[in-house]
Amino acid sequence: MSLRRSRIIGCGSYLPERVVTNAELGASVDTTDDWVVQRTGIRERRIAAKDQRCADLAREAARAALASAGVDPATGLDFIVLATTTPDNTFPATAARVQAALGMTRGMAFDVQSVCSGFIFALSVADNFIRTGQCRTGVVIGAEVYSRILDWEDRGTCVLFGDGAGAVVLSAVEGENGSGTGAGAGILSTHLHSDGRHYDLLYVDGGVSTTGTAGHVRMNGREVFKHAVTNLSGVAEEALAAHGLTPADISWLVPHQANKRIIDGVARKLGVPAERVVVTVDRHANTSAASIPLALDEAVGDGRIKAGDLVLMEAIGGGFSWGAALVRW
Ligand code: UT7
């Protein structure tokens, strides 16, 4: 069994300056602050400036993560994996733009598309590159400008999303520190799932080979909600069981931030008390692939997540695709 695993050695995030409240949205669609807060827990979200692209948000998050890790992107990075559903262009990968902006001229940079579970999928891809010995150090980014694919006349979706980016730096750890299930710091395991039968419950009604336009988010919220609670608690249990752990061992649950009721439902099903759950959905809304690294950066930055903590991340998104990552901090 390989003794090598990857460890998160730095976190960073970026939020656009503009704050948009529910009341502000209520001026253009038939909604109220009360409805949005009660049904979702969202109070406000950040919206990118007109000239801000996904790569701009991603670059800032990556810079912050690299600074906290003390890694020079010009010399110390082997890869960038960027999870996004809202890339700058159809090609090249948004990760390649970030690579150039960071002054990184070696290694590789590519995007991963798995919608709201994108960060977990990207983390898993990166973790596997490190475990197999192909790479030592890299950045995993979740970055989104969902404001560009929202139908601002559809109150069922436009109140739910926001823009932002989060990033982590991963580095290989070997020997004693990386061996023994649950013993050393690092990513213990990742668990990924997809079920393409549910395509029409959550999708974008555009694309290169369909309409030739970017399209807008379409969602059957009630159905997505049911799948979310069942699949997220299922994959969380799967991740814990893989290491002989139980929900009582979790120091911090860092869930995808789509809806406070989903977050509470999963925590309740697992038996994780509310004070051990990191919540940002009230201020960020659903930032899709960016939501977990944004929440992680907040909880690491304010000292809640500390060395030795067991951190469980979980997310679900269109596809459906869902997954979990278990990390010893
Ligand atoms: O990132 C992963 C993917 N996304 C998710 O995980 C989201 C999952 N779903 C949800 O979060 C929730 O289903 C929503 C927040 C989207 C909706 O909450 P809900 O409690 O499931 O409401 P609903 O869709 O059943 O709608 C209830 C009512 C409807 O009116 P009628 O048909 O009962 O008269 C909607 O038209 O609420 C109405 N409604 C609104 N009212 C005021 C829907 N959106 C709004 C709104 N303001 N923004």
Image: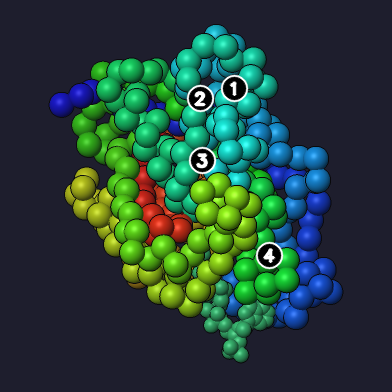
Q: Give the residue at mark 1.
A: 99
Q: Secondary structure at mark 2?
A: strand
Q: Amino acid at mark 4?
A: Asp
N-terminal of the pair, mark 4 or mark 3, is 3
The x, y position of residue 268, in whole percent, is 39, 70
Q: Give the residue at mark 3.
A: 83
Q: Image check: 208 left or right of 174?
A: right
The x, y position of residue 233, in whole percent, is 34, 63
Q: Residues within 10 Å of mark 4 (few under 14, many from 20)?
A: some
The x, y position of residue 49, in whole percent, is 80, 46
Mark 3 C-beta to ligand 1 under 8 Å: no
Q: Amino acid at mark 3?
A: Ala
Whether label 2 touches label 1, CB < 8 Å = yes
Whether label 4 touches label 3, CB < 8 Å = no
Q: Is residue 241 in view?
A: yes
Q: Is residue 272 in view?
A: no
Q: Quadrant of residue 201?
A: bottom left
Q: Residues under labels 2 and 1: Cα distance? A: 7 Å
Q: Image check: 271 left or right of 164?
A: left
Q: Give the residue at mark 4.
A: 151
The x, y position of residue 278, in whole percent, is 53, 55
Q: Give the residue at mark 2.
A: 109
- Observer-side mark, 2 or 4, equals 4
Q: Closest to the observer: 155 or 230?
A: 155
Residue found at the far left of this picture: 1
Mark 4 C-beta to ligand 1 under 8 Å: no
